[in-house]
């Protein structure tokens, strides 16, 4: 469950490379592009530019490099030529990358063009909730502390937290123990130890938290059709706190900025 220093160094390299994938996407106008085009773009960048492996492709029979979840899609959206991003959409790209045998996992919700203020607020609050959870990570803390901080922030802002999907341990395998719930009670759950690595990936809905899976067996949507947003980072428990392994350059300093109550 815990990683040795040499393993953490390899995971940090995978995380750095994955962060660069999102930094590449940040520079691209998304409106007018299909999610299948973006999937192909990300695959070329990971394989050709980074000399790494897109870890999601082939995992559990999934045929693509990324999940693309638009508007009311909560998670596991399947890239498609017919899903063309348009002005006003929000879309989450969930991407994994493996280098030297270790996997990093991260996701970001993008606002495409001129997005309604209510949608922007959801995206912003979900991002804040991610950092509220990350701020709880330190040796001796408990998993319930992470979930409580996330859910408290979501509820304070009028949003619900999806409960069917959660964060997870990660390393040589994409999904390892423990599970990281995005709700909970402080002071409960597994005690965190130095060397643990896992993802935190809250999904917040504008409406009710209930979800359903569509007929393709992958795409998860809100039951009430409300918007949903998600952000995710891979983190490591350090001797003094937390290291965000998938941190992007524009996020340096976020931990101190976004953790005030």
Image (cartoon, rainbow, N blue to C red):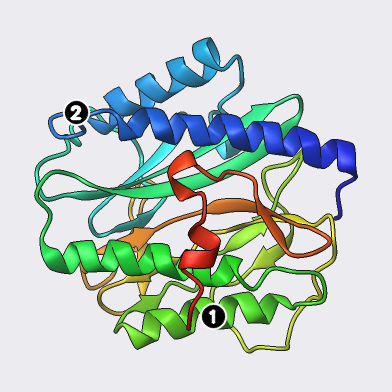
Circle 2/circle 1 CB separation < 8 Å: no
Q: Secondary structure at mark 2?
A: loop
**Label 1 belongs to which residue?**
149
**Marks 2, 1: nearer the viewer:** 1
Residue at 52% x, 45% y is: 106
Query: Residue 219's spot in the image, x, y percent?
Result: 36, 50
Question: Would you say 53 lies left or right of 7 here?
Answer: left
Q: Residue at x 73, y 41 (%)?
A: 173
Give coordinates of residue 43: x percent, y percent. 45, 21
- Neighbour class for label 2 at 10 Å: few (<14), some, many (≥20)? some
In terms of image quadrants, where is residue 142? bottom right
Mark 1 crowdedness (10 Å alpha carbons): few <14, some 14-19, many ≥20: many
Say if 205 sits above or below 55 in the image: below
Label of residue 47 in the image: none
Quickly name the residue at label 2: 33
Nearer-N-terminus badge (2/1): 2
Q: Which quadrant is the N terminus positioned in? A: bottom right
Residue 55 seen anywhere in this rendered image of the structure: no
Q: Residue at x 70, y 38 (%)?
A: 12
Q: Position of residue 200 (x, y in %)?
A: 57, 60
Using the numbered discs, state the Cα–Cα distance from disc 2 to disc 1 in whole angstroms: 36 Å
């Amino acid at each position: 469950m815990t990683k040795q220093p040499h393993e953490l160094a390899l995971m940090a390299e995978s995380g750095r490379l994955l962060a660069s994938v999102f930094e590449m996407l940040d520079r691209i106008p998304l409106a007018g592009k299909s999610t299948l085009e973006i999937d192909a773009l990300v695959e070329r960048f990971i394989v050709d530019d980074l000399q790494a492996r897109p870890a999601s492709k082939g995992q559990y029979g999934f045929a693509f490099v990324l999940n693309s979840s638009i508007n009311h899609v909560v998670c596991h959206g399947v890239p498609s030529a017919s899903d063309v991003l348009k002005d006003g959409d929000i879309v989450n790209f969930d991407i994994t990358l493996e280098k030297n045998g270790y996997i990093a996992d991260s996701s970001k919700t993008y606002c495409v063009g001129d997005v309604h203020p209510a949608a922007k607020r959801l995206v912003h609050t979900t991002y804040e909730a991610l950092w509220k959870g990350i701020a709880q990570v330190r040796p001796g803390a408990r998993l319930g502390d992470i979930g409580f901080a996330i859910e408290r922030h979501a509820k304070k802002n009028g949003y619900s937290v999806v409960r069917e999907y959660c964060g997870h341990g990660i390393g040589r395998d994409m999904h390892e123990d423990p599970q990281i719930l995005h709700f909970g009670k402080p002071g409960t759950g597994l005690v965190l130890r130095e060397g643990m690595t896992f993802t935190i990936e809250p999904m917040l809905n504008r409406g009710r938290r209930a979800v359903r899976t569509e007929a393709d067996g992958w795409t998860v949507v809100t039951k009430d059709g409300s918007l949903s947003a998600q952000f995710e980072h891979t983190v490591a428990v350090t001797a003094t706190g937390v290291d965000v392994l998938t941190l992007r350059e524009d996020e340096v300093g976020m931990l101190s900025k976004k953790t005030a109550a």
